[in-house]
Amino acid sequence: MQESSETYKKKYGVTPADADHETLIKMIEDCFKEGLETQLEPFPETDREFSAILDELRGLDADQLRAKLGISGWKLAPHGEDDMRCQECMYYLVHRRWCDLPELNLPAEPEWWCRLWRI
């Protein structure tokens, strides 16, 4: 599904850039219900690899939600043998249920994960 500000406005009455927390959560969940596949690999092992992903995300605006989720490898479940999840990530704000990584700046549930996960 092609993303556009108008598509979000028609469906939710607001764009991702202007949406409140709960609406953004709904938008994210709906992206996955609509079949969004994200890039879970490669997991960035070095600062250079991590920075390359951030550079790619910086080129997106707040309304390019599907692209942000895809590039960051977003997942609505824990990941890997260790069940890594947002709740243990250094960028996760527990009381706000929010990813504070500036390039993402999105709500996140504790059990979700993305490949920008850091401890």
Image: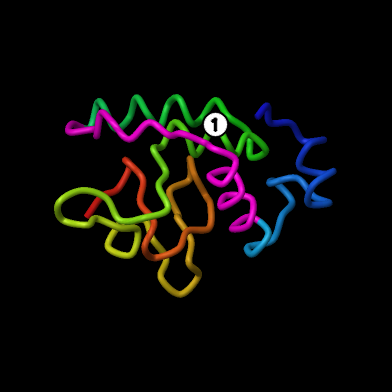
Residue 37, image x and y in percent?
46, 34
Q: Is residue 36 magenta?
A: yes
**Which residues, given as a range, are shown in magenta?**
24-46
Quarter containing the C terminus: bottom left
Query: Callout 1 environment at 10 Å: few (<14), some (14 to 19), or many (20+)?
Result: some
Which residue corresponds to the image point at 57% horizontal and 36% vertical from the top-left? 66
Which residue corresponds to the image point at 48% horizontal and 67% vertical from the top-left? 97
| 33 lies above or below 43 | below
Viewer-proximal residue among 33 and 10: 33
Residue 61, image x and y in percent?
63, 33
Badge 1 element: helix
Q: Is residue 53 left or right of residue 102?
A: left
| 52 lies above or below 90 | above
Q: How is the image coloured?
A: rainbow
Q: Quadrant of residue 74?
A: top left
* Residue sitting at the far bottom: 95
* Number of numbered discs on residues: 1
Which residue corresponds to the image point at 36% horizontal and 62% vertical from the top-left? 111
Viewer-proximal residue among 92 and 82: 82
Q: Is residue 61 magenta?
A: no
Quarter containing the N terminus: top right
Residue of label 1: 67
Q: Is residue 119 left or right of residue 110?
A: left
Q: Amino acid at mark 1?
A: Ala
Residue 96, image x and y in percent?
50, 70
Residue 99, image x and y in percent?
45, 55
Which residue corresponds to the image point at 67% horizontal and 38% vertical from the top-left? 63
